[in-house]
Image (cartoon, grey):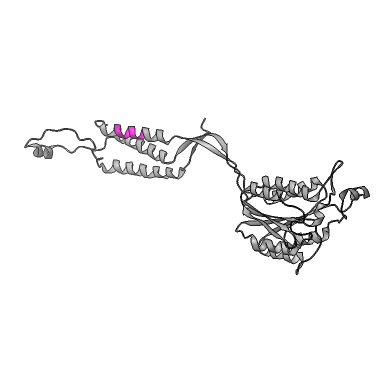
Amino acid sequence: MFSNLGLLQPLWLSLLLLVVLLFWRRRISNAPWPNLLHRGRIRFPLSVEMENDSKEVSHYQPGRERLLLLSMTLFVVALTQPVIYRDTVELPEQKDPVDLVLLVDTNITMVLKDYFDGDRSIERMSLTKELLSGFVTGFQGNRIGLSLMGNPPLHWLPFTEDRRAVTDAISRIRVTLGGRLSDMSASLKLVKTHYSTDLKPVVVMVTDSGMQLGEISPQAAAKELADIGYTLYVIAIGSTELSEEQKNRAGFVYDPVDLNLLNEVAKAGAGKMFHAQSIDAFEEALHTISKEQANDNRSINTLPLVEPLYPWFMLFGVSLLVMAFVRRGG
């Protein structure tokens, strides 16, 4: 019956001890309460002498004291904010404390069509754009930025909370937009230069590149990111083994991804490397990254609705208080 009742501020109950002490002292000292409603009286010259000759009367009136005690008890209970818990409402999705940078390769080999959906060949870049758009839409973190790997790399979109702006920017990516080749180390250094954050920074690099064009190695550039708190995930796109028929369907000059290099880069960046050998593997990699960056402490997603009861306690307390001071003795 009382399972749905609760107190929002239960510490106020400690005042009950003071109330009890106050009334106990009242009974011992026999001190009068202030008379809020004075009775009408007729004055005449001998009134002072008559008052002095009157016998001493006890100010303690049990009936009034009980009403006052009950009234003050109700006021204290009202301070504790008693409520009845009703239904619950869902809270808006809470954001994970993550700022994400997407780093997408645009070198010429991204035109290769070595992903297959039945008889249909899918271009590396087309698949990357499609899956990253879905990943961005469901991303529960804070802000997202987008840069393009190239030679030189391009700072494509600064940090923003606007998911639609990010998906629109992804849709406008084209192969060779940053040049026919990619400088991986320069691309990682660009992230360090253009994306500063006080939250947990994460980089997801999608690439099929195995070339090293920069002055420093990609591993060294990745370590610099890790040293300032970034976590680097690398999604290696492209197959390593294809049948002759699939190679012919892939087009261009088939260039397998360098998994050893990309694995070293990911480890240097304090993250992991995922090989997207298939469409499902690509999706699973994005899902794993999202899950690893989720806030494990985000457990409260509902808010209870409460019905306050304190107005009733206040009303009854005031009623008893009025009764105590208008009644004639106890």
Q: Position of residue 158 (x, y in %)?
A: 63, 56
Is 215 on the left-hand or right-hand side of 30?
A: right
User: Which residue range is magenta in the image?
Assistant: 316-323
Is 316 on the left-hand or right-hand side of 96?
A: left
Residue shown at 16%/37% (left/top)? Answer: 55
Is 77 on the left-hand or right-hand side of 268?
A: left
Res 324 seen here: yes
Residue shown at 83%/56% (left/top)? Answer: 257
Residue shown at 36%/42% (left/top)? Answer: 19
Q: Position of residue 88 (x, y in %)?
A: 56, 36
Is 305 on the left-hand or right-hand side of 192?
A: left
In the image, residue 319 lies in the stretch drawn in magenta: yes
> In the picture shown, does residue 3 fall above or below 31?
above
Residue shown at 85%/49% (left/top)? Answer: 114
Q: Position of residue 132 (x, y in %)?
A: 72, 48
In the image, residue 10 lies in the stretch drawn in magenta: no
Give the quadrant of residue 12.
top left
